[in-house]
Image (cartoon, grey):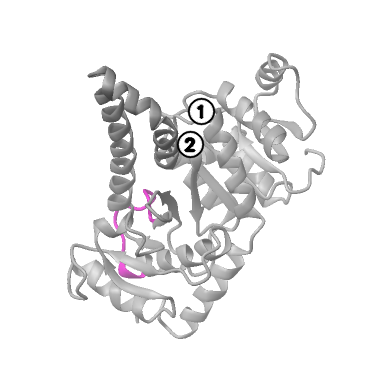
Amino acid sequence: MPETLEGAVALDAMGGDHAPAATVQGAIDAVRQLGLRVLLVGRESVLRRELAQRGGAPKGIEIVDAPDVVSMDDAPTAPVRAKRQSSLVVAAKLVRDGYAVAFVSAGNTGAAMVTAKLTLGTIDGIERPALAALLPGIHQQTLIVDAGANVDCKPQNLMQFGIMGHFYSQAVMGVARPRVGLLSIGEEEGKGDRVTVDAYKLLAEAGLNFIGNVEGRDVYAGTVDVVVCDGFVGNVVLKVSEGLGEMVFGLLKLEARKSAFSAAGFLLAKGAFTGFRRRVDYAEVGGAPLLGVRGACLVGHGRSNPKAIRNALRFAHSYGRHSVVRDIEAKVAELRSHGRSEGE
């Protein structure tokens, strides 16, 4: 077991398309630039070599050996069946056993979710954990729950997503009274499929600041703080948002090359364009928290670079130090006592 590093975040250093180079560099940056403490989890010999190439491990980084590696092609159940000494499982156990406040993985998303659920356990009354992703907006960021963990949902699942998003928005994002909206094809109460219509009723009775149905345009308009939807829709929204941001910036660069006048204009507005790119860059957030498990888990993008890893560690540390899990558990218990968490 590692030495006690108060407030440390465990990092699955073998997870991700660019691991371990990107994860090790991201951890170093998090320690030096943000003052965080990081437990690097993975094959010790590999991690020591990566650290040596960068001048050695700075104070605040400790290696925790984990001989197995979960690949992107492995089945989601691989960590708990065939690779129980993987960096993913060991990182989750560090949170479970109190050695870390949170763990981060940019590896196999399905495996990370299964590992977190089985290693940390789920909050009483939460049937399905959900990914919560931050999307950019003109005046604020919007939290979308679920962003890809659950394809088929029941009305009570969506209601629970709203509860989890509410408390995460309060504790981590600092929104005093989050506006919770249900993503649908129209603002009217009766719009949407059967699941959405039934979920509307449950959310309206959940004691949240529920503002009703919201449409796709509301995600970026600043009119809602937490958007509730199933993971299929949420993941599509997330990936379209990433692609749209990259396309817009690419088009701006393309237009700038068409003439000397356009190029001069681009250079004059370079600061504004840089700010725009920062707003739509997934690496600025680093990952999505998995809400509903008994511990802080943040799932990063598979192509995470060092910047994304650094920011994922920052967000995970903030999440892990708040009482989000306890707050969600208390609210769900309250609703269960009134028979509302099961749609009764």
Could you tell me if residue 328 is visible in this image? yes
Would residue 183 appear left or right of 32 to someone viewing this image?
A: left
Indicate yes or no whether the magenta region holds residue 146.
yes
Mark 2 or 1, nearer chain start: 2
Q: Is residue 68 left or right of residue 341?
A: right
Real-space CA distance between mark 2 and mark 1, rounded to the nearest whole angstrom: 7 Å
- Looking at the image, which is closer to me, 79 or 226? 226
What is the number of the mark on residue 283? Answer: 2
The quadrant of the rendering that contains the N terminus is top right
Q: Residue at x 47, y 80 (%)?
A: 335
Q: Residue at x 56, y 28 (%)?
A: 306
Residue 90 visible to an observer of this rendering: no
Magenta span main SS: loop
Q: Residue furthest bottom?
A: 338
Q: Residue at x 34, y 74 (%)?
A: 211
Determine which residue is flagged by label 1.
Answer: 305
Q: Residue 112: x percent and y percent?
A: 50, 42
- CB under 8 Å between callouts 2 and 1? yes
Which residues lie in the magenta part?
Answer: 145-156
